[in-house]
Structures are given as structure tokens and as C-alpha cells.
Image: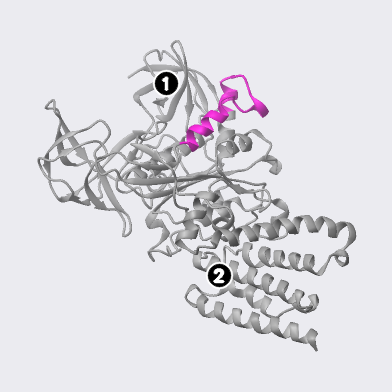
Amino acid sequence: MSKGTIKKVAGPLVIAEGMRDANMFDMVRVSDRQLTGEIIEIHGGEASIQVYEETSGLGPGEPVESTGSPMSVELGPGLIGSIYDGIQRPLDKIMEQTGNNLKRGVQVLSLNRETKWHFQPAVEVGQEVVPGDIVGTVPETEIVLHKIMVPNGVSGKVTGIAEGDYTVADTIATITGSDGTGHNLSLMQRWPVREGRPYQEKLSPDMPLITGQRVIDTLFPIAKGGVAAVPGPFGSGKTVVQHQLAKWADADIVVYIGCGERGNEMTDVLNEFPELKDPKTGYSLMKRTILIANTSDMPVAAREASIYTGITMAEYYRDMGYSVALMADSTSRWAEALREMSGRLEEMPGEEGYPAYLGSRLAQFYERAGYVRALGKEGRKGALSVIGAVSPPGGDISEPVSQATLRIVKVFWSLDADLAYRRHFPAINWLTSYSLYVDTMGKWFNANVKNDWMDLRARLMRLLHDESELEEIVKLVGMDALSAGDRLKLEAARSIREDFLHQNAFHETDTYTSLQKQYQMMHLVLGYYDAAVSALEKKANIEDLVRLPVRERIGRFKYVAEDKTDEEYDQIEQMLSDEIQQAIQKEDL
């Protein structure tokens, strides 16, 4: 261990001298208060340390001690349902020690050393194991079976293992290597957060992450193992979109990182998630969720750590063969922390004051997502999907963080202030958003939902694009100048926008829509358009077709409970057919 003394304090940056034996990214304890920090630059015997706690009151001459190891997280049973700060300290345990206000220098173990977990072996004495093999399981929650894996760098023959109740620190198995070295395995392992966990190979994503949000699943799907960005100005609904994805995405595990956002947004998550029932299992969403709360009033340097802490935990569950979804809200605040530390280090600034390495740091984070074959003889497949919110100042996505993110991600959900102002939520702009997974995921939708899914999606997009062109004409010459066919296109597009794309996150039924129901909704909206076009050709009156009562019922279809949609769908189709026929007969008379 290297020991030194403080030379200079500049906000969250502390310069320590006498640290010649320390290494980059070593964890350090700063001053007698034992504040947690990390070495981010070394010049000779001087180390620059970013401190993850408030540094007021520190002064030159106070001691600094390196722990000799990089910043790491504890991985094991007990992560699910926990609420951590940016450096994996459990906030509930800190509150028990210090009360409602966080105090500096509090040292709390990330995983509870007293809780006993029932371990069920999956291998026998004498079996050969390699890194990544599962030696046993622990029921972590009612819906998550925690798989205990052989740590990286350990292989050999199992020489001892027994079923029983253990704490995370107890030895549950012994493995003897070919050189005779014995390794004691516990339920817990540690992993440095800045280093991605290894895997055998990265696979091409082949199925979508179903979210229950119609504009996402139908128009701009994300793959399991994919990466998406949600940029948008203040008030456009980034956080609610992130909350919706965390609640309803088809993932086994959700890691939600509140990175530098307002405290009341994290409070909403903490209040809502325990109350909400998972639609797949019926249990509370917290039974499969890990929360990392690093709000805007917490020390700025810890924002940088929180992103890596979260993605390391997510990779750990991915290696067990689970589908994991990670929400980062927001990467802009993380980038601001990088900018502040870079300025304190007096580095040459890049565009808008961000460090020149902003793009590479973002890439390092997003590239840890993916659909992989995990280590181990079994070759389990796991997926880690990353969805990052971006908060560009004034909604200007030409700023560096948005542009660097867009160069990396494959899905872009562009939130629009105008849509939000018109109370259209989710405010994802269908003209500027895109998904590069559409073609691959389209094959899955056609094969697993209905074989004309992609045809219907293409028709929806075409009508929405036609609407944007026709609106320009309407602004110039008025609605009366349009032909009956063009007017019908505008009406169909309005139905797509208001009845299909608009979704109420706070409505009990509308908050989540199954793929089958999404297909039925597409079919009804386009069915009305096709029937009306056919009626127009038979000289029906456009005004009658626009005011058909069935349109109101099509619009209300999204509020129909999932178990009643088939019956309602059939009734609407019959009603549509009858009313179109009446409109045609009216003109014949």
C-alpha cells in the first residue's frame, strides 16, 4: 500500500504527493475521515484523485492511503431489490447508521454479511470446472435464481461442496487446480468496475426487447443486447420513457441508474416500483430490479463511478444467462462530471469544454452491451441491453454528447418538445427517430406475431410521412384545396397518431400493450383507411366517412383489457363493415 499526503484540494479533485508506488485507478482513502477516492492521473510521485464524497474541510498535509486495488463491486446474492449510491454503498444501511442525511466517510459493506442463503450444488466432488461454470444456485428472490459461477482465473477439480445455508462470505466449495493450488469459493466475488467482464463470443442480436410501448415495439424496436439513446429537451418525457422501459421491458433483470438527475425522480421510482406488479410473474417489480441513486445533489465525481458500477452488476447477471436491461438517466450528467474533472486536471478542452476523450469513454460504456455466449462449458447465452437518456441543453442534439452517442447507438428515439407541448406522449418523433434493428427484428415479428406485421408497419410509416408533406400544402392553400383521397390520408394519419402512437403511461390498461393487441390496433386503423378508400371509389361522401361513429370505438380500443380484445376487435370489424356499407348506400339513394 502506498501512503502520501494531500498537497492541494480543488473541489472533488485532490492532489496527493508521496504516491510513487500507487497505480492508476487504485482506490484510496483520503484524510482521517476515510473519504473514498480513485486515482485518475499520476505524475512522478504526485497522484490526482477524484473523491466520491464532499471534500470541504480537507487541507494540505492530511494523510492519503492507497488500498492497492482498483475500484471494484461485490457481486453475489442480495443485489436484487437493493438501492445503492454511485460506489455501491447500500443507502438503507447508511440511513440506519447516520439518519436521513448522508455523512462523509461512512464505510458500509455492499452485501449483507449476516443474511443466510440456501445454496443448492449443481456439481459433484471430482468434477472438472472452468471459469464461468455454475457450481450451484441460490433462490435470490421469488423470480430470480442466482447462479453461483466459478470466478475468472479459477479452474480445476471440485474437492469439496455441500448444500446448506451460507452467508456470502462463507466457503461453499473448494476447487483444486492442476498445480495443486486450492481455491475456496464463496457466494460472492469482486470485479473491477472499469473492466468489462469476459465472455466467449459476441453474437448477433436475433430477437427484440419487447417493451409494451407501441411507438417503440412497432416503429423503432430495440434488440435484446442492443443499445438505444433517448435524447430530448427538458420536459419532453425522457424520465417517464425510462421508467416505462424499466417497468415493462421483457427483461429478467433491470438495473436503473439515476445519474445526476433530480432527487424527486428517483423518489418516484422508489415509491412506484415496490407497488407495481410485473405482468409476467405477478410479483413486485423490485423482485428483479437493482437501483443506483446518484442524484444531482450528490458529489459530482460519483456520477462517473455510478455508470460503471451499474453496468458491471448488469454484466454479472448477463453471464448467468439472463436478459438484462440497463437504464442510464442521464449520460449527459455523467459527461458533465467528466468535463468538470477534466477542467480541474487542466486538460486541453475539446468541443464545448468536454474532454477530447468524451467519445471514447461513451463508446467504452455502450460497447459493454451485447448478446453474448458466456464463459463456461455450458455456453449460456445472455443479453445486456443499454438505454441511455441524453439531456442536450435546449434540446440541441448537435451538441457533443448527443453526437458522440449517435455515432455508437443503433436506436435513436428522438423526443420532441412540440409533441410534448401538444401533450402527445411518449413524445417520440416518428419522422426523426430510427432503429437500425428494424430489418432483423422484422423477421422475428413476422415469424412470431403475424406474417404481415412488417407490411402493416411500413404502411403506417408511409401514411405518417405523407401526412407531413400534406400538412405543408394545407398551410399554404388550406384544407379545402385537398382532394378527398388526400383528406382521407390526413384522417388516417391522425388516427395513427392519436389512437395508436399516443399512450398513457399512467392508465392502468394503456400503460402496457401486448404485441397481439398492437397488431390488432394497426389492423383496425388501416382497416378503416382501406374501407374508406374503397367507399370513396364507390362515390361515398368524404364527410360521412370522416364522421363514422366506429372511429370513436377504434380510438377507445387501446383502453380495452387484454382478455377482452378479441371480442371487441370482432365487433369493431363488423361495425366498420356495416357503417361503410351504409355510407355507400346513402350516396346511391
Name the residue at 70% across, 67% down.
492
The type of colouring in the image is one colour
Instruction: Say if 506 sits above or below 158 in the image.
Output: below
Q: Is residue 544 above or below residue 81?
A: below
User: Secondary structure under badge 2?
Assistant: helix
Q: Are marks 2 and 1 in contact (CB under 8 Å)?
A: no
Circle 1: residue type: Met
Q: Position of residue 387 (x, y in %)?
A: 52, 46
> Would you say 567 lies left or right of 464 here?
left
Q: Identify the residue at image location x=45%, y=10%.
A: 44
User: Quick check: is 512 in the magenta stretch?
Assistant: no
Q: Which residue is mark 2?
A: 520
Depth check: 384 or 99 in front? 384
Report whether residue 293 is seen.
yes
**View extreme (front): residue:** 538
Kindly give the residue lying farthest to the bottom in the view shown.
589
Nearer-the-camera pick, 392 or 55 = 392
Residue 155: x, y in percent? 20, 33
Q: Residue at x 51, y 37 (%)?
A: 303
Range of magenta residues: 340-367
Q: Compare marks 2 and 1 and give the one earlier in the sequence.
A: 1
Distance between the alpha carbons at the discs numbered 2 and 1: 57 Å
- Residue 252, percent across and down? 39, 54
Within 10 Å of disc 1 (Cα), the crowding (few <14, some 14-19, many 20+) is some
Q: Report the amino acid beneath label 2.
A: Gln
Q: For residue 351: magenta? A: yes
Query: What is the secondary structure assignment of the residue under circle 1?
Result: loop
- Residue 2 vs 531, above or below: the answer is above
